[in-house]
Image: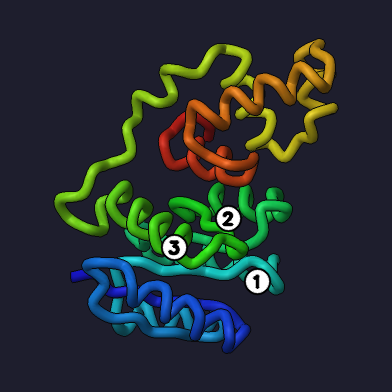
Amino acid sequence: MTTVLVCDDRRNVREGLTRVMAAVAGVQSIDCVAQGDELLSRYARQPVDLVLVGTQRAVAAGVVSTRRLVAAHPKANVIVFGSPEDAGAIIAAIAGGARGFLRWDSSRPDLVASLAHTLTSTGVLPGGPRAPKEQGSRLSDRELQVLVGMSQGNSNGEIGRSLFLAEDTVKTHARRMFRKLGVKDRAEAVAHGFRQGLVS
């Protein structure tokens, strides 16, 4: 059975995620901490299968907490949750060792489904289907270049200038890439790209 630790400085968020996680099949226990220092000491005393770190309000703190935890415990399975508009923070957290990203504004059924998929695709829930690495091979060269540009924090305009493409063309490649990867936006695409080794 899976154990989960939630780290966010907002009590209502911690309580809400606890209720959501309780609906995910296979999750045995959920614990919560408010700050990064608590997260490090709690994980050191009692490691868990999955750590959820919030980046919505304390963006820098969430990124730093993720980096510190993974540096101290390389096998820690960390997922960040926040706004898809915080792409830079999400990219930094993924680069710092987080395994993926969850949207904070998803509906409860979508969030439950996303958590279940994340747990199985990272191997936290045994016996579940792993995310197919073949997805990356379906991307065209241009789509992969756009994904790499996004992973570097570049805007569509900046990506277009580096590839000598119009911004609208970049957006077209991005939409196709989102469909192929099964993601909704650039934050999810970058998280998926890091997790699957498509970007580094």
Q: Measure the alpha-carbon separation of dots 2 and 1.
A: 10 Å
Name the secondary structure under disc 2: helix
Residue positioned 57% across, 26% down in the render:
177
Q: Which mark is residue 137?
A: none
Work out whether 83 lies above or below 10: above
Binning the other alpha carbons within 10 Å of mark 3 as few (below 14), some (14 to 19) or many (20 upward) gives few
Q: Quadrant of residue 40?
A: bottom left
Q: Give the residue number, with chain letter if any, for mark 1.
A: 61
Task: Identify residue type, mark 3.
Answer: Pro
Indicate which disc, 3 or 2, sits on the residue closer to the N terminus.
2
Alpha carbon distance from label 1 to label 3: 28 Å
In the rendered view, does 131 fall on the left or right side of 70? left
Q: Can residue 70 be seen in the rendering of this structure?
A: no
- Disc nearer the start of the sequence (2/1): 1
User: Residue 17 at what x, y percent from top left?
Assistant: 47, 76
**Residue 109, disc:** 3
Nearer-the-camera pick, 27 or 23: 23
